[in-house]
């Protein structure tokens, strides 16, 4: 499952980070998006991009194509 498939208010857990831009993956990991971390979708822009998630006590906005590097499971 991918982040873009979630609706506002849904909670998910990160399973793994898919292959992609290595530097971007490192940025996500540095921000705490590591396997096992739960997050909640708090907002989705009217056109679906970006997506705001609440994770580890802060809000993080990700573009849809960047957020889809996260392989998730719904909680």
Image (cartoon, rainbow, N blue to C red):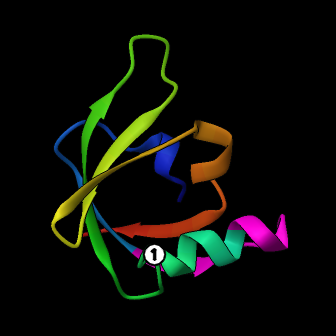
Report the residue at 58% width, 65% height from top. Answer: 70
Image location (x, y in percent) of residue 21: 84, 64
Task: Say whether residue 28 is left or right of residue 7.
Answer: right
The answer to if 39 sits in the magenta stretch is no
Task: Say whether residue 49 is left or right of residue 17.
Answer: left
Q: Mark 1, residues whose alpha carbon is within 10 Å: few (<14), some, or many (≥20)? A: many
Task: Say whether residue 53 is left or right of residue 31.
Answer: left
Report the residue at 15% width, 67% height from top. Answer: 57
Task: Say whether residue 42 is left or right of residue 23.
Answer: left
Is residue 21 shown above or below 13? Answer: above
Image location (x, y in percent) of residue 10: 22, 50
| SS of the residue under disc 1 | loop
Is residue 1 shown above or below 6? Answer: below
**In the rendered image, which quarter contains the C terminus?**
bottom left
Report the residue at 58% width, 81% height from top. Answer: 16
The answer to if 19 sits in the magenta stretch is yes
In this view, the residue in front, 38 or 55, is 55
Magenta stretch: give its range. Answer: 14-24
The residue positioned farthest toward the top in the image shown: 46
Report the residue at 47% width, 68% height from top. Answer: 72
Image location (x, y in percent) of residue 59: 26, 51
Is residue 21 shown above or below 5? Answer: below
Residue picked out by circle 1: 33
């Amino acid at each position: 499952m991918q982040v873009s498939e979630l609706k506002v208010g849904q909670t998910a857990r990160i399973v793994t980070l898919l292959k992609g831009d290595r530097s971007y993956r490192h940025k996500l990991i540095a921000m705490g998006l590591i396997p096992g971390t739960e997050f909640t979708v708090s907002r989705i822009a009217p056109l679906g991009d970006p997506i705001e998630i609440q994770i580890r006590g802060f809000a993080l906005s990700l573009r849809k194509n960047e957020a889809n590097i996260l392989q998730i499971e719904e909680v």
